Image (cartoon, rainbow, N blue to C red):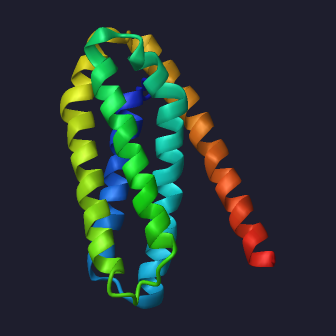
Amino acid sequence: MSKPQIYDVLQREHEEVGELFHRLEEAKGLIAHQLFVRLKLKLVPHARAEEAIVYPRLLKADATAEQVLESLEEHKQVDNLIAELDALSPRDERWAPKMKVLADMVGHHVDEEEGELFPRARQILSDREAVELAEAYARERDAFIDDMQRAEQRGAAE
């Protein structure tokens, strides 16, 4: 069996995030908070690893550079919304509308990434490089997940 390419890994994670957003649509109170924590643990490491591993390579190519710059801006907007949601309780009347905007933004980002960026990247990256990016991305993502979990544990202990 062949090793997964970066497109496979990112698409699988996009699907996982989509499922969490779907579950969050109906969630309330503690369940909504728990799902949001899981969502952050997927979205934040995903974005940071894309920024550290995938995007620098794609910025080097004219065919993908502009799209990557747009994606970086979208990541900043997502980060801002996550921070705003972090400061609110799911019981706050602003929480659900902000979550809807976050879901819409991430959905738009995913559509562009899979529909526009991936096809262009496939023209630039060799199969071998796409596998190597997937491996490096996974290591980076996992390191961010570990960092977030340690920070969460420290916060809970204080």
| Res 3 seen here | no
Residue nearest the observer in this picture, 58 or 149: 58
Q: In which quarter of the image is residue 135?
A: top right
Q: Residue at x 65, y 57 (%)?
A: 148
Q: Quadrant of residue 158?
A: bottom right
| Res 75 seen here | yes
Q: Which residue is drawn at 34% across and 36% down?
A: 71
Work out whether 36 lies above or below 142. below
Q: Residue at x 57, y 27 (%)?
A: 136
Image coordinates of residue 40 in percent, x first then y, are: 49, 61
How many labels sit on residues? 0
Image coordinates of residue 134 in percent, x first then y, are: 48, 28
Work out whether 142 lies above or below 3. below
In this rendering, would 140 be left or right of 94?
right
Image coordinates of residue 83 in percent, x first then y, are: 49, 64
Image coordinates of residue 140 in percent, x first then y, are: 61, 36
Q: Which residue is drawn at 54% across and 47% down?
A: 45
Task: Look at the image and tell me in which quarter the N terminus lies.
Answer: top left
Residue nearest the observer in this picture, 85 or 108: 85
In this rendering, would 57 be left or right of 28?
right
Work out whether 16 lies above or below 133. below
